[in-house]
Amino acid sequence: MEVARVAIVGGHGKTGRAVVEGLAGRGADAVPLGRADWPDLASAVAGCEAAYVIAPNLHPDEPAYVASALAALRTVGVERVVYHSVASPYAPAMPHHVGKAVSEDLVRRSGLDWTILQPGAYLQNLDLTGPVHLPYSPDVRFGFLDLTDLGTAAAVVLTGTGHGGATYELASRVATVRELADEAGVPVRQVAHPASHPWLSAMFAYYDLHGLPVGTTVLRALLSSA
């Protein structure tokens, strides 16, 4: 199916903007939609061949959010969907990851032509212009994803062929935060951090023990076809 017009559900944040830029680079027309468009999402996505679905961070019921989006797509005949999940979605210690795991199941059973992207932690979430203070160990390994790479990979998957039924973990590089800080020439240390949400506290505790490693081979393959 040729894709020329793509709805970005939840498209006004940094993830959505990266996908919009990636689609523009491949000559596709992106339609970024924010929460204000939800009262009539079906009308907002009408005329699009595909949709990229991003839930708000720490959404209290991501499966319900995703189910509503999928229903809207089916209502107006949008056949192609790419769901923005997370690396290691089934991590029972992190409730917001589990919500994405449940949402992945909904996407797989939606009847649509689906692809799931599982991004690692964004490189852009780290401010390496000065001292880095972390609420978890700086010495655990992460698969970090550059937002530009995410946008390009998303555009490849949305507009290319052969990605239906695929689940792709995405990382631009594997490193510890200490390694990144050393490269930037800034100090890093672990500090106590009173999280604003219990799910964040759970995430920090998980990171402190395990990090979030993600391989880089899949992303390299996708970028090579861009």
Image (spheres, rainbow, N blue to C red):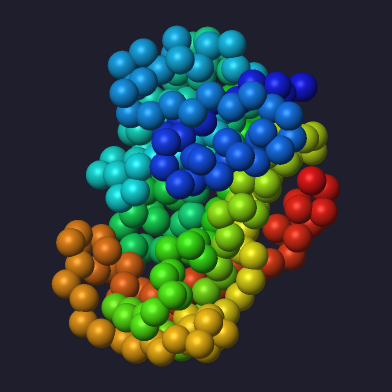
Give above or below for 191 relative to 168.
below
**Quadrant of res 4:** top right
* Residue 7 locus on image (x, y percent): 54, 25
Q: Nearer the viewer, residue 132 or 219?
A: 132
Q: Residue visible at 36% across and 13% down? A: 40
* Residue 166 locus on image (x, y percent): 68, 45
* Residue 47 locus on image (x, y percent): 59, 11
Q: Residue visible at 77% across and 22% down? A: 2
151 sits to left or right of 74: right
**Quadrant of res 132:** bottom left
Q: Residue visible at 41% across and 89% down? A: 187
Q: Residue visible at 62% across and 63% down? A: 171
154 sits to left or right of 180: right
Q: What is the quadrant of the N terminus in the image?
A: top right
* Residue 122 locus on image (x, y percent): 50, 61
Give above or below for 31 relative to 200.
above
Residue 8 visible in the picture: yes
